[in-house]
Structure formats: structure tokens, C-alpha cells
Image (cartoon, rainbow, N blue to C red):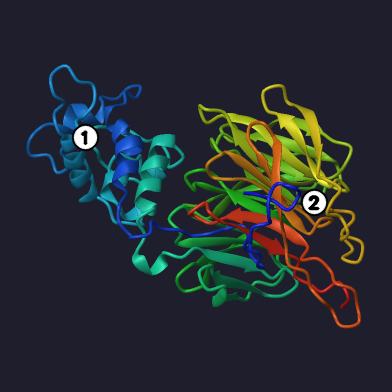
């Protein structure tokens, strides 16, 4: 994207009040053949420890799920055979609903929500298995046409509602009520549940997405702030904003709190790495980021900073493992770069000084840069700046500044113009637009 810093005219970007969660579907509401061919189909040929390949059983005639027999001398299917496999697989899924799809449930262990018996054994021990997650992604991407547009959830943290905004119209289409001081929001992989941290009651509210009704209140160990969900959706992790610092683990099948993990300092934000192996909590007070091993559910290591830890995002290696963490810090109009392998900060990037005329009147000099995200294609890093009233774009992996997009200003009566105060970044499913959450309150009120 060309920016307004000497690299071409600024392009218009989307800026509206929004939270960092979205629901999405493929444009036509159909199962994606190309994704099936490149990502799902190889799973059927994969050798899993202690199990025969799916291919070994499902080439037999009479199988409900039937795979084409490989041609002699070939290790992969032809285009025609792939189409046949796609049709066979499609008959065993409910588009948009992995938890209702036999293709996913039959080989899944019963204790993880799968069928009681599968003659091929428990191919997937949990819904967090990367291959099961890939199957789920394929099925979820084909949600019904009525849910094509991404929906943006805005937690009104000084009120008792959560507004749901249709991204295509920027209109509120639903309101979740009865949650006083909602803070963080995340979603089940199938989009059927919304999980919201409730500061007033120190609970996790579980909401049915379609009806917007609260279906369960899960008691937490303390006052919550932000939350996240593990890859595959098996656990919700809630940051507890109380000393000495902890993360609550809620199992999504039973909707019970199963563990409280000790970390360094009260938790404001928590994130899961793209490979699903780790969670990283951030503490403003203790100026620390704690990396949690999600297999053992214990703190593995931490990075100390000279400033409070704010939002963060991750860059992946080609094999999917975590390469770097980009961490925003209190009082820094920029971000720190943490090398995941060496477990230490290796660089600190300061955003350009120009433009830079905002922040003081908005009372945000303590958090001049809040909101950061790596685009879904992994090729760019986007960083909010209240000081610049803009969002900056950096190329990856080079971390070279590409440009910036200025945000709208506000004009309070009898006062100079103030900035939009960008707080969060999320990406719409088509990857062609980013969405920025702005501050909820007028600083002059």
C-alpha cells in the first residue's frame, strides 16, 4: 500500500469502532476445492504413529467415505481423482459446522467430542491436532450465504452491551445485553459461541451467537481483562488482572475452569501463537511477557522489558513455528522485536516522527501506539499510532516501512481537532482491508 510519507498518495482505509474478532465464510458459501486439494487431501495419505493411513482403509469398495485408488507409480492423486475425493468428502460434512460433520467427528477421540467408535482408531486425539484444525478450517469456510459478511464485535467496556456490526454496511445488526463491563471477546472455531470476559462479575460469559443469549457463566479466579482461544477451540484462556498474575483455563466442552496458570504479573492481554503451541501473556505492571507451553499448561520462559507490555502479534517461520513476537510497550510509539528461538529482544522499532501532532489532547501519550497485527498472508505488519493518527505498514520479514494510512479526525465543539485514537487492528477475511478499533469515549467528557 502506498503511503502518505513520500511513497505516493495516501489510500483510503477502513476505520470504525470494532473489536478484534470476526466471523467469515467463503464468498459463495461452498466448500473450497483448492483448499481441499492442497491442504485437506494430503491428510488422507499421511502416516500417523500407531495408525494406518486413512487411504489404506478407505479405498475399499462399499465405504461410505471412499478415496480413489492411486495410479501405479504415483504418490498423489490425479486431478480427476482429486475431484472424486472432494465429492466423497463433501457428502460427509455440514458446511460451516465442523462439530456436525461426520468426516471430522468419526475419527476424533470420544473424549474430544468424537464418535464412540471408529474402525480406524482415534486418528485425532483432540480438536487441537493441526490436521483436525485444517479439516475444520475447510468446513467452516463454507458457512451459509447469510453469513458472508464479516461481523465485528465491539465490547462497550464502560457499559453493559456488546454491539455486533455488519462490516459490509457498518451498521449494528445485533446487541448482546446483560454483560456489565465487558472487556475481551473471542469465538469458537465454528462461530456458534462468543466468549466474553466480564469485569463486573469476574466471570466468562458464554453467548450463543445466533440468539445473542448468555448460555453459561463460568466463574473465574479473579478480575479478568483480555482473553483468547486455543487453536482448535478446546480451551479459552483468560488473563487475570490481579497480582501475582495468572491465566485461567476454561475447557470449552465442559465449560468448566480446569486450571489457573501462574505467570509473571497481572495479565492485561494474552495471545496464542499461530502454531497453537504457546500462549503469551503480557503484564503492564511487571513489564513482562510470559510464554506458556500449552501442552504442559505451565510458564516456559519470559522476556523482561523496561516498559509495560501492551498488544503483541507473531511472525511465523515457513514450517509454521513462531519466529518473532512484535510487542508494543507503554510510552513507545513503536514496538519491540523478540526473537522466539533466542528468547530475547533483538530490536526496537520507533515509528516515524511525521505525522505526529496528536496524542496530548487525547490523553494517550502513555500508550502512543496500541494495536498491531500481522496480515493473514504473513507478508506485512500493521501498527497503529495515536501520535500520527495513522496506521503504518511494514514489509515482512525485512521490517521495512512501506507507508501509512491517515485516519479520520474528530472535531469537538470549541476545541481543536483530535485524532481517532486507534486501539486495535483486525483483518477482514478477504485480506484486502484492515479494521481499526477506536477509543470509545470522548476525552472531553
Q: Which of the 4 image quarters holds residue 17? A: bottom right
Quickly name the residue at label 1. Answer: 119
The residue carrying pointer 1 sits among few (fewer than 14), some (14 to 19) or many (20 or more) residues within 10 Å by Cα, namely few
Q: Which of the 4 image quarters holds residue 20? A: bottom right
Q: Which label belongs to residue 369?
A: 2
Q: Is residue 10 at least partly visible in the picture?
A: yes
Mark 1 to mark 2 CA distance (whole Å): 54 Å
Nearer-the-camera pick, 292 or 146: 146
Q: Which of the 4 image quarters holds residue 405? A: bottom right
Residue 328 coordinates in the image, percent (x, y): 77, 44
Whether residue 175 sits left or right of residue 391 in the image: it is left
Residue 239 coordinates in the image, percent (x, y): 70, 50
Q: Residue furthest bottom?
A: 413
Query: Which of the marked residues, 1 or 2, is nearer the chain's N terminus?
Result: 1
Q: In front of the other: label 1 or label 2?
A: 2
The vertical placement of 309 against 200, above or below, is above
Residue 323 coordinates in the image, percent (x, y): 63, 29
Whether residue 169 sits left or right of residue 159 in the image: it is left
Nearer-the-camera pick, 10 or 59: 10
Q: Residue furthest left?
A: 61
The residue carrying pointer 2 sits among few (fewer than 14), some (14 to 19) or many (20 or more) residues within 10 Å by Cα, namely many
Residue 161 coordinates in the image, percent (x, y): 64, 75
**x 74%, y 60%: residue:** 422
Nearer-the-camera pick, 228 or 407: 407
- Pick the quarter of the image with the C terminus: bottom right
Whether residue 72 sits left or right of residue 230 in the image: it is left
Amino acid at each position: 500500500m502506498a503511503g502518505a510519507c513520500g511513497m505516493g498518495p495516501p489510500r483510503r482505509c477502513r476505520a470504525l469502532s470494532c473489536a478484534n474478532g470476526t466471523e467469515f465464510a467463503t464468498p459463495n458459501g461452498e466448500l473450497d476445492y483448492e483448499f481441499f486439494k492442497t491442504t485437506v487431501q494430503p491428510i488422507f495419505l499421511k502416516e500417523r504413529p500407531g495408525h494406518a493411513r486413512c487411504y489404506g482403509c478407505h479405498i475399499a469398495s462399499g465405504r461410505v467415505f471412499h478415496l480413489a485408488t492411486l495410479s501405479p507409480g504415483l504418490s498423489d492423486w490425479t486431478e480427476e481423482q482429486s475431484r472424486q475425493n472432494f465429492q466423497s468428502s463433501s457428502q460427509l460434512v455440514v458446511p460451516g459446522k465442523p462439530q456436525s460433520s461426520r468426516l471430522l467427528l468419526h475419527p476424533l477421540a470420544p473424549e474430544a467430542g468424537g464418535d464412540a467408535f471408529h474402525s480406524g482408531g482415534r486418528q485425532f486425539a483432540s480438536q487441537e491436532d493441526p490436521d483436525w484444525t485444517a479439516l475444520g478450517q475447510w468446513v467452516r469456510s463454507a458457512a451459509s450465504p447469510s453469513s458472508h459478511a464479516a461481523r465485528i464485535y465491539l465490547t462497550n467496556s464502560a457499559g453493559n452491551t456488546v454491539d455486533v456490526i455488519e462490516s459490509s454496511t457498518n451498521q449494528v445488526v445485533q446487541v448482546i445485553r446483560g454483560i456489565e463491563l465487558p472487556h475481551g471477546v473471542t469465538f469458537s472455531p465454528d462461530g456458534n459461541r462468543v466468549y466474553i470476559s466480564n469485569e463486573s462479575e469476574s466471570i466468562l460469559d458464554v453467548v450463543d451467537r445466533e440468539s445473542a443469549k448468555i448460555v453459561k457463566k463460568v466463574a473465574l479466579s479473579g478480575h479478568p481483562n483480555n482473553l483468547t482461544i486455543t487453536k482448535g477451540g478446546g480451551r479459552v484462556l483468560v488473563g487475570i488482572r490481579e497480582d501475582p498474575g495468572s491465566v485461567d483455563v476454561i475447557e470449552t466442552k465442559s465449560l468448566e475452569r480446569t486450571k489457573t496458570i501462574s505467570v509473571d504479573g497481572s495479565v492485561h492481554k494474552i495471545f496464542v501463537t499461530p502454531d497453537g503451541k504457546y500462549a503469551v501473556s503480557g503484564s503492564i505492571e511487571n513489564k513482562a511477557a510470559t510464554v506458556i507451553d500449552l501442552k504442559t499448561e505451565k510458564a516456559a520462559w519470559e522476556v523482561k522489558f523496561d516498559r509495560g507490555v501492551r498488544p503483541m502479534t507473531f511472525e511465523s517461520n515457513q514450517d509454521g513455528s513462531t519466529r518473532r513476537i512484535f510487542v508494543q510497550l507503554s510510552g513507545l510509539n513503536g514496538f519491540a522485536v523478540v526473537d522466539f528461538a533466542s528468547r530475547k529482544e533483538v530490536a526496537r522499532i520507533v515509528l516515524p516522527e511525521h505525522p505526529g501532532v496528536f496524542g496530548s489532547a487525547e490523553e494517550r501519550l502513555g500508550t502512543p501506539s496500541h494495536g498491531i497485527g500481522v496480515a493473514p498472508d504473513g507478508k506485512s505488519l500493521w501498527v497503529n499510532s495515536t501520535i500520527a493518527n495513522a496506521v503504518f505498514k511494514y514489509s515482512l520479514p525485512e521490517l521495512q516501512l512501506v507507508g501509512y494510512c491517515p485516519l479520520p479526525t474528530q472535531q469537538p465543539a470549541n476545541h481543536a481537532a483530535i485524532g481517532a485514537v486507534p486501539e486495535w487492528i483486525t483483518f477482514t477475511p478477504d485480506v484486502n482491508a484492515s479494521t481499526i478499533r477506536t477509543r470509545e469515549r470522548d476525552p472531553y467528557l
